[in-house]
Amino acid sequence: MLVLPFVFIFIYIVIASFQLSSPGLNYDELLFTNAALGSIDHNFVDVRIGNFPVMLMNYIGALKAYIYYPIFKLFGVSAFTIRFPMILLSAAGLYILYRLSLSLFGGRTALVVLLLSVLDPTYIVHSRMDVGPVVISFFCKTTSLYFFFLFIKQRKTNTLLLFFLFCFLGLYNKLNFIWFLVATFISILLFYRKPVLSCIQKTIPIKMQKTGVVICILLCLSFLYVLKKLSFLEMINLFYFKHVLYVIHELFYTLNGQLFLTQSLGMGKLVAPFYTIAGWVVAFTIILSIGIRLLKRFKNKDVGLSFHFLFCIAAIIYFQIIITSNAGVSWHIFELYPFIPLLFGVSLVTLFESETILAILLSSIILYQGAIYSLYSASYNRPDISSAWSKDIYQLIDYTKKQDKQFVSMDWGTHTQLQAFDHVKGKYFDGWGVNDDRKVPSEYYKVGTLIIFHNNAVTSMKLAKEIFFKQLPSTRLLKLHKTIGIYEVWEVGKK
């Protein structure tokens, strides 16, 4: 029994690490690399103190860059060093999830929750690619909840402080962590108000209590900032019907493991009708089992209180996603983790006390999860995968590293991908964002400069190419220098 959790987590690490360079590295996976490598330019370094990066974007902190700084120093930059550390951190998050489940619901339930998590295709693919990013957020949510319940049991101030520490780290990592914070503090007021306030009054000095009030005010201000940045609570669109239906649809496709496959990888064509139907059955079973679970009486009041507390957090997070007009992509819905496998696992164990029936159900779910993840594995090396995940980027990186010329990347993300692997000052320039109002800088038309575009088959990237050619000075010409997969390299010359 003591070994099983580690066996499950090892299986997860093996599955998540298989063919680690596939699919190609997405530009959003690499947004932290410039800061982690010393901030050679302003690419994804929004705020810095001296040369020290503080914020990568106005809503993403530099926490991940700090983690990777020693990794890149010791082992360099590669698909392995970019992806494997987050797989290890997500594995650590799974172990904490197991310990949390064990302390709240017992060993049998904890193993079921862990088993559902390690084989969940949604969890594997998001942790493997960490686009969003989501892994640090998952770790901070799980760890903060673990210390909160430890505080409820022990009534020790240090565990409460650790709870606040991981809440702060999660918020600094990415500002939409505020969804979890809002949901958690509302749920604490509803379910654990008395023990928390009692402990604060008895053990924390008045000055620290006042400091806590100031921190809460700052959190509220942060929340208001997020509301503004995400067009949150637009009164006209508060319950905009299409958006509500869209987010509900995204939730169900997250539950059946197919959202990232269809939305991000563009591989919906691989999903046979059987998988879709089976996925909806799985999703419906989760909702139904949780509903029945709530109607059942709890033999242990503490267990019931914990379950309702966790369900309340998940429900409030989801409500915030629904009323956030800019939310709805897979990594936003992933903010419902670890609550989805946790609540589902608890529900299954409670509803099906027979070990035989439970084993049959778990076997069916595992087979389904395996079938879905096999679709992900099949998609990783396909040539028709979304251009954002194309493995052609590796060929382009190898080519540019060997050249001594200046490169200008005109399409979104290419500069980030190239500079992560060849951190040479003055070699790479980011030309993305030009339009009819924002002119192409004249230095980009310097003779001998190599300009990188996606080819015309990548229709989402055609605008920058059209504008660049449109603004081409009369004294310059462009000739196709090289074609590398989905990329075209053009050289600036004289007429």
Image: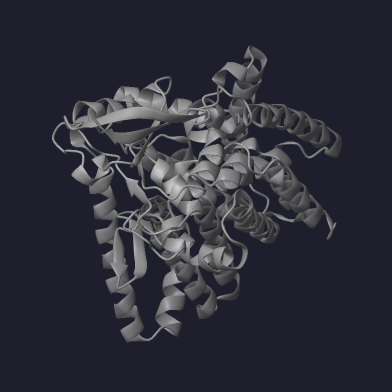
Given residues 129 and 140, the one toward you in this image is: 129
Q: Is residue 238 visible?
A: yes
Q: Nearer the viewer, residue 475 or 434?
A: 475
The colour scheme is: one colour
Relative to residue 191, is residue 477 depicted above or below?
Answer: above
Residue at the image point whose x is 46% and y is 62% from the top: 36
Q: Is residue 478 depicted above or below 157 in this figure?
A: above
Q: Is residue 466 left or right of residue 178?
A: left
Q: Position of residue 472 (x, y in %)?
A: 21, 31
The percent coordinates of residue 230 (x first, y second) are: 28, 43
Pinpoint residue 330: horizontal percent, then vertical percent.
48, 36
Residue at 63% in and 54% down: 303
Quadrant holding the N terminus: bottom right
Residue 195 vs 117, above or below: the answer is: below
The residue closer to the viewer here, 95 or 83, is 83
Hey, which quadrant is residue 61 in on the image? bottom left
At 62% from the left and 24% from the top, the residue drawn is 279
Which residue is more in the foreground, 154 or 460?
460
| Residue 124 drawn above or below residue 246 | below
Instruction: Point out the image quarter for the C terminus.
Output: top left
Q: Can residue 133 be seen here?
A: no
Q: Write down the quadrant of residue 89 in the picture.
A: bottom right
